[in-house]
Amino acid sequence: MERTKIYKALKASSGEKITVCGWVRSFRANRFIALNDGSCLSSLQVVIDFENTEQQLLDTISVGASISVSGEMVESQGSGQKIELQAHTINVIGTANPEEVQKTILQPKKHNLETLREQAHLRFRTNLFGAVFRIRHHMSFAVHNYFNQKGYFYIHTPIITGSDAEGAGEMFKVTTVDNAQKKYNPEEDFFGKQTHLTVSGQLEAELAALALSQVYTFGPTFRAENSNTTRHLAEFWMIEPEIAFADLKDNIDLAEDFLKYLVNYALTNCMEDLLFLNERDEKEDLQRPKNLRSELNLIDRLRFVVDNEFIKITYSEAIDILINSKPNKKKKFKYLVEWGIDLQSEHEKYLVEKHFKKPVVIFDYPKGVKAFYMRENSDDKTVAAMDVLFPGIGEIVGGSQREERHDVLLKKCKEFGIPQEHVWWYLETRKFGTVPHAGFGLGFERLIMFVTGMQNIRDVIPFPRTPKNAEF
Ligand code: 4AD
Ligand code: MG
């Protein structure tokens, strides 16, 4: 059976004979089926000549059922669509019991996002999640497209790792030892040492960049931090480019160019889904109190990012702005603002959403709040780190120029309490033809949140992993 995808059927001309397969979204008047196969947002209207169709067959066509239909495309008499499929033969492939459907989100009405999350196995069938996951696909394709065009090589870094790149105590252990049975001895464990799920592919990507010059990783990343926020997952996807012969400025420029490319790619390739999400975003916005509403709608927010240069300021400048800000003077910030603090999301929010109203890149952070591998600046106080902050999202990218000087890196390892024997291979690259190099990590789900306007990170990954939640 030659099958036509519905996105193509909708562009067919009157008179074409086709076969389509999909799931019934609605069935009314024993005559009109809205059929959707997920290939695009729109459903195809299938019209049945019910007087000449067996009642037994009609009875099995119901919301949620899968069917195939052969027939002829004809100009529609109705107002909802230009073209529709006049059915000649209908096959019910899988039925759906209407009583059971009543209890699920397949029931065509508005369901709240929590309910949809509880039925993550079915939420792909909704317009909303169809749109989100089609966009997620296009964005991941765009990531590879961007780097491929620019001559970067895709490196697969390990998921099971013996190193801890970010240096925070927030990793998942990987072990085959039953800890309840005996005292843990790493030498008896599967790898002969303690291993974890990776928190970043960066250290390994650096090794590759110091030979292939420009590389990137794009893989799952795991963090056991117990932060139950709308922006954190325990399992998320990160894109980490790493470039040799490059400094912090090159790194910032790459991040800006890359983000603009991705957002523009969505505007160019995902407009049907974006228009749907835009309408949804506008409706959601109206539910909020006036002072919390956004000035721009979703599509305008995306265009704004593509069309405007990101603001670039040092951490010290950011602190000055915060110290002199209204909320600080009125003691509205929960966390104290002073040079040396790690910026909290309330501070980032103020800078991006109130002060600049633009994406902001903050660079040159105090070395105390950043990782051991970041390159020390000559002021002895800061490192060549950078974060990109987006309106409504906060930190979307974090990166740095790397410490390429062997002696300085060795000193940093000591200061951070990182045993040399754990990172000997990383240190060694600084002995054989070391070069200035830099890179960053883009949180893929945070990007998808920005592009789709979804407010909770659990709604942009098919099966979210968060504290106390690993269903499906
Ligand atoms: O700032 P982070 O921790 O940076 C790194 O891991 C570096 N090794 C990257 C590099 O230089 N190669 O994480 C990078 C980005 C953050 O900016 C954020 O977008 C995302 O990853 N991220 C998370 N996304 C979802 N859930 C979490 N728990 C996240 N933690 C970080
Ligand atoms: Mg960070």
Image: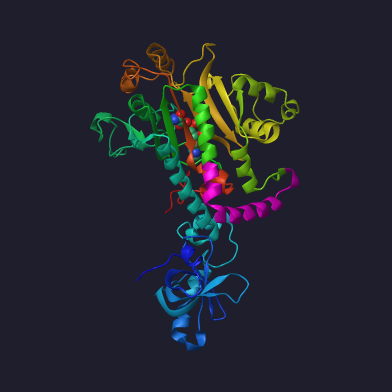
Residue 355 vs residue 38: left or right? right
Q: Residue 404 in the image: x percent, y percent?
A: 40, 17
Q: Residue 405 in the image: x percent, y percent?
A: 40, 14
Residue 383 vs residue 317: left or right? left
Name the residue located 72 percent from the left edge and 23 percent from the top edge: 324
Examine the rendered structure and indicate whether residue 222 appears above or below residue 252: below
Name the residue located 63 percent from the left edge and 43 percent from the top edge: 301
Residue positioned most to the bottom: 51
The answer to whether any part of residue 397 appears in the image is: no
Examine the rendered structure and indicate whether residue 130 appears above or below residue 23: above
Q: Residue 3 in the image: x percent, y percent?
A: 39, 68
The answer to which image quadrant residue 208 occupies is top left
| Prevailing SS of the magenta stretch | helix
Q: How many marks?
A: 0
Examine the rendered structure and indicate whether residue 88 appears above or below residue 179: below
Residue 297 vs residue 223: left or right? right
User: Which quadrant is the N terminus positioned in?
Assistant: bottom left
User: Which quadrant is the C terminus positioned in?
Assistant: bottom left
Q: Residue 395 in the image: x percent, y percent?
A: 56, 34
The answer to whether any part of residue 72 appears in the image is: yes
Residue 74 lies in the magenta stretch: no
Colour setup of the view: rainbow
Residue 282 lies in the magenta stretch: yes
User: Which stretch did the figure color magenta?
Assistant: 262-291
Name the residue located 64 percent from the left edge and 28 percent from the top edge: 335
